[in-house]
Amino acid sequence: MRASTSLKTVTLAAVLIAAPLAGAYAAGHRKGVLDASDPTDMTGPRVTSLIEQVQGVNQGITDAREANNISASEARQLHMRAAHISQAAEHVAASDHGRIPAAQYHDLLRRLDNVDQRLRNDTGSGFMMGDGSDGGNYPNG
């Protein structure tokens, strides 16, 4: 039963992470020179996408904790890591007229993916390596 719940959680998290990326990529390429954001506006496509992805990962952490797939301390640690990424995104956006430069955006995405991969490993649903010929499959990470 837990494997089924974990698979549902991972699937939901993957959908929540992938959907905003597609929209953010498309929206970022249609923006014109005259469409400059208000300096206090934190709703650029990269900011919005990243915040939504952090929310998706946080929901996955909450779901895993409620299903007793991870301990309270693991959940707290993962939530804190996700919160630091969100705060970093907001800080960068605040210093750059509501936008996140591409290099920093990709770095923040990489950090968030590391949190998500850690969640998958902690719940036992991470990508497995090995074909069993040496005695089993092992989590990647």
Image (cartoon, helix red, strand yellow):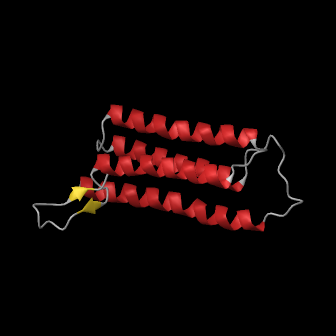
* Along the line of sight, the residue nearer the viewer: 102 or 26: 102
Task: Tell me: 95 left or right of 71.
Answer: right
* Along the line of sight, the residue nearer the viewer: 70 or 2: 70
Q: Position of residue 75 (x, y in %)?
A: 38, 37
Determine the residue positioned at 25% across, 52% down.
Answer: 2
Determine the residue positioned at 39% across, 46% down.
Answer: 63
| Placement of 32 over or under 80, stated as above or below | below
Determine the residue positioned at 79% across, 44% down.
Answer: 97
Q: Position of residue 12 (x, y in %)?
A: 44, 58
Q: Position of residue 135 (x, y in %)?
A: 10, 61
Q: Position of residue 9 (x, y in %)?
A: 38, 55
* Along the line of sight, the residue nearer the viewer: 63 or 39: 39
| Placement of 71 over or under 99, stated as above or below | above
Determine the residue positioned at 31% across, 60% down.
Answer: 127
Dividing the picture into quadrants, the one containing residue 7 is bottom left
Count of marks, rendered view: 0
Kindly give the residue lying farthest to the right in the view shown: 34
From the image, which quarter does the N terminus lie in?
bottom left
Task: Tell me: 101 left or right of 51.
Answer: right
* Along the line of sight, the residue nearer the viewer: 136 or 16: 136
